Image (tube, rainbow, N blue to C red):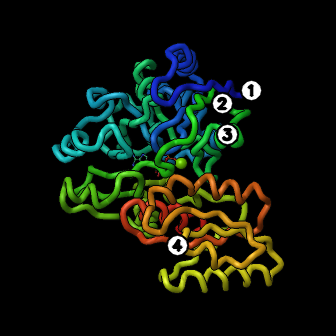
Amino acid sequence: MTARLIPVDPASPDPGAIREATHVLAAGGLVAFPTETVYGLGADALNARAVERIFEAKGRPTDNPIIVHLADEAALAAIVTDVPPSARTLIARCWPGPLTLVLPASPVVPVVTRGGLPTVAVRMPAHPVALALIRAAGCPVAAPSANRSGRPSPTTARHVQADLGERIDVILDAGPTPLGVESTVLDLTGATPTVLRPGGLTVETLQAIVGEVAVATLQMQAALARSPGTQYRHYAPRARVVLVNALPERAGADLDAAVRRLWDQGLRVGVMVTAESADRVPPGAVVRVMGPRGDPRVIAANLFAQLRELDDAGLDAIVVEAIPEEGLGRAVMDRLRRAAGAG
Ligand code: AMP
Ligand code: MG
């Protein structure tokens, strides 16, 4: 099977293209589609066999639950058993958008979709193509990122094709996804709202809306196994990722040292740096500039594409400059730590 690639206008997708994709979903097939975060791999969330096909196509461990995507708040009633007031407040302020809420699951949600958990993760994406598809499908759409499990998430249709082109039915191509990192996953089933995965909606924004918010560390996530997907090495290119954690004023010298150390081992080295450090990379390394240190939105949008590009260049190691863990920088650093093999 080779996926049919259907180009669509990101702002107003052709109804014919959307119809074609919904026929695939209705038949239990797999459709990759753009969201405002990354490309998702969609199936009818209530069709257990279709969701099993997502796990097979991705090579995803079966205890890693999948986020269910809705086209409106009203659709929540059919798949969760309780919507606490904090969820209503967050939904009113943040949907559609990159915020996923973990809530108690209704029994109609197949166990395979929930990775065996009693809860289900739900969100309403902000991308016009995603919304048009879910609305037309008339069912909740289970959609993890459309990459092979463990690889960097796809921010273009070409990334999806490279990983899954022979394993899925349709790819809706609407160009690069705007945010570039996945949604924030917030667990609302405990006493304190807890961020299980930092993402496109910042912790600072959540705190401004609901007050106290806990943030699970990589270690806590693994121990709790409440967000099982967080146990596995993720976002990883084939090349080894070396994260250089340095104060801004030392970053240049530390990057230079890290590159030379790898060269001494005879390795081919790529480097991802902030604009401020670009001139400190020793000549001879393959360089990608992530963006200005103070603008994590730009860095997030470039992150996965640059990891893939450097990987495709056949390098042995990728040295990446750490950025401040504020705002979207928290999501960027979470992905980089996992790419480097922590957690
Ligand atoms: P992905 O779909 O690949 O973007 O990953 C979805 C993330 O949401 C993973 O880290 C999952 O572990 C997490 N997730 C999905 N459903 C649940 C749930 N019911 N409880 C906790 N975490 C979840
Ligand atoms: Mg993923």
Q: Which residue is mark 2?
A: 168
| Residue depicted at 52% across the width and 42% down the height | 177
Q: Position of residue 51 (x, y in %)?
A: 53, 32
Q: Counting residues from the N terminus, which is met first, the one under dot 2 or under dot 1?
A: 1
| Mark 2 or 3: the one toward you | 3
The reply to whether callout 1 and callout 3 are in contact (CB within 8 Å) is no
Q: Position of residue 271 (x, y in %)?
A: 67, 69
Q: Counting residues from the N terminus, which is met first, the one under dot 1 or under dot 3?
A: 1
Q: Amino acid at mark 1?
A: Met
Q: Amino acid at mark 2?
A: Ile
Give the secondary structure at mark 3: helix
Q: CA distance from mark 3 to mark 4?
A: 27 Å
Q: Amino acid at mark 4?
A: Ala
Q: CA distance from mark 2 to mark 1?
A: 7 Å
Q: Is residue 10 left or right of residue 319?
A: left
Give the secondary structure at mark 4: loop
Q: Amino acid at mark 3?
A: Arg
| Mark 1 or 3: the one toward you | 3
> Few, some or many C-alpha atoms within 10 Å of disc 2 (few <14, some 14-19, many ≥20)?
many
Give the secondary structure at mark 1: loop
Q: CA distance from mark 1 to mark 3?
A: 17 Å
Q: Which residue is mark 4?
A: 322
Q: Nearer the viewer, residue 269 or 62?
A: 269
> Few, some or many C-alpha atoms within 10 Å of disc 3 (few <14, some 14-19, many ≥20)?
some
- Whether label 1 lies within 8 Å of ligand 2 gets the answer no
Q: Is residue 196 left or right of residue 279?
A: left
Q: CA distance from mark 4 to mark 1?
A: 40 Å
**Does residue 115 appear in this view?**
no
